[in-house]
Image (cartoon, rainbow, N blue to C red):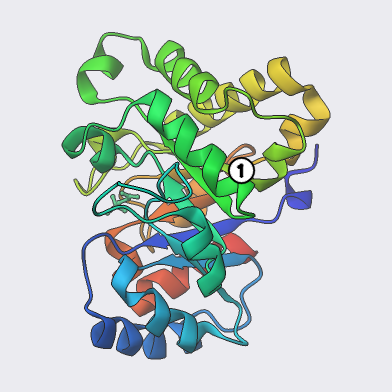
Amino acid sequence: MDKNKRRAVIAGNWKMNKTPAEAAALMDALLPAVAGAGCDVVVCPPFVALPAVLDKARGSAIAVGAQNVHFEKSGAYTGEIAADMLAELGVRYAIVGHSERRQYFGETDETVNKRARAAVDAGLCAIICVGENLAQREQGVTEDLIRLQTRVALGGFTAEDLKKVIIAYEPVWAIGTGRTATAAQAEEVCAAIRMLLAELYGQKVADGVSIQYGGSMNAENAAELLAQPNVDGGLIGGASLKPADFGAIVKAAGV
Ligand code: PGA
């Protein structure tokens, strides 16, 4: 399928940065930087900054996402946030299974599946992150691992559910390190993910799913990465906090 039929999605993952007031100020700078975007633009601030960011984003081309979401609707889960709580605020996306959640907070493929399910059931779009670490890449198991992570994350998902799913391929060794995957490496894995989706759901459904690359994507390398046939967007950490850089990435995705 012509990749241009899949609208690119550039999502900024602000991680644990920006107080509500700082987040509002960042939005003031981001809004003009991404004006006229030819792709979907999403920002994912910390939970407590969501109201301030939603307020700024209203009526603009920027959609708002959360960085995580719990799998139960309510209950004794201290410190967690349910999907309905996010949806009621006007949040439209939720990142699920980011490698930092997997590494520091014990997130597993099974909990990623449950969280993604809850997000989609609440009408949110789940940005499901998968990725290998350096040892796994050096052992040559990247493709097997990504297939397994993706397969488990999508357990029980129908073709209809996939309309609310984005897969983000984020090699762990590239996140926050300044060491980006080459365009060929990113394309190879994103193509493998699409092939798996085609095996599971058929080529037509697979062709409709957006697959992002993430890991030190920046204003300089974005155009080459986004030009790859199976790279449909980016999940951006560090550069999403810099309005000019984020704006340049958004422009690179819109051409
Ligand atoms: P980075 O982070 O762009 O700072 O490498 C990407 C991510 O963690 O999503």
In the picture, residue 98 is in which quadrant? Answer: top left
Q: Does residue 219 sit above or below 137 in this rendering? A: below
The N terminus appears in which quarter of the rendering? top right
Q: Does residue 243 sit above or below 105 in this rendering? A: below
Q: Does residue 132 sit above or below 182 in this rendering? A: above
Q: Residue at x 57, y 27 (%)?
A: 154
Tell me the crowding category of disc 1: few under 14, some 14 to 19, or many 20 or more residues within 10 angstroms, Cα based. Answer: many
The C terminus appears in which quarter of the rendering? bottom right
Disc 1 Cβ-to-ligand 1 distance below 8 Å:
no
Q: Does residue 198 sit above or below 88 in this rendering? A: above
- What is the x, y in percent for residue 138? 25, 14
Q: Nearer the viewer, residue 88 or 216?
A: 88
How many marks the image carries: the answer is: 1
Q: Nearer the viewer, residue 190 or 20?
A: 20
Three-letter amino acid code of the residue under disc 1: Val
Is 151 placed left or right of 205 in the picture? left
Whether residue 166 can be seen here: yes
Q: Nearer the viewer, residue 60 or 227?
A: 60
Q: Residue at x 75, y 40 (%)?
A: 208
Is 239 placed left or right of 57 in the picture? left
- What is the x, y in percent for residue 203? 79, 25
Q: Which residue is mark 1?
A: 165
- What is the x, y in percent for residue 141? 36, 10
- What is the x, y in percent for residue 111? 39, 31
Is 189 placed left or right of 162 in the picture? left
Whether residue 221 can be seen here: no
Q: Residue at x 57, y 86 (%)?
A: 58
Q: Residue at x 24, y 84 (%)?
A: 22
In the picture, residue 110 is in which quadrant? Answer: top left
Q: Secondary structure at mark 1?
A: strand
In the picture, residue 47 is in which quadrant? Answer: bottom left
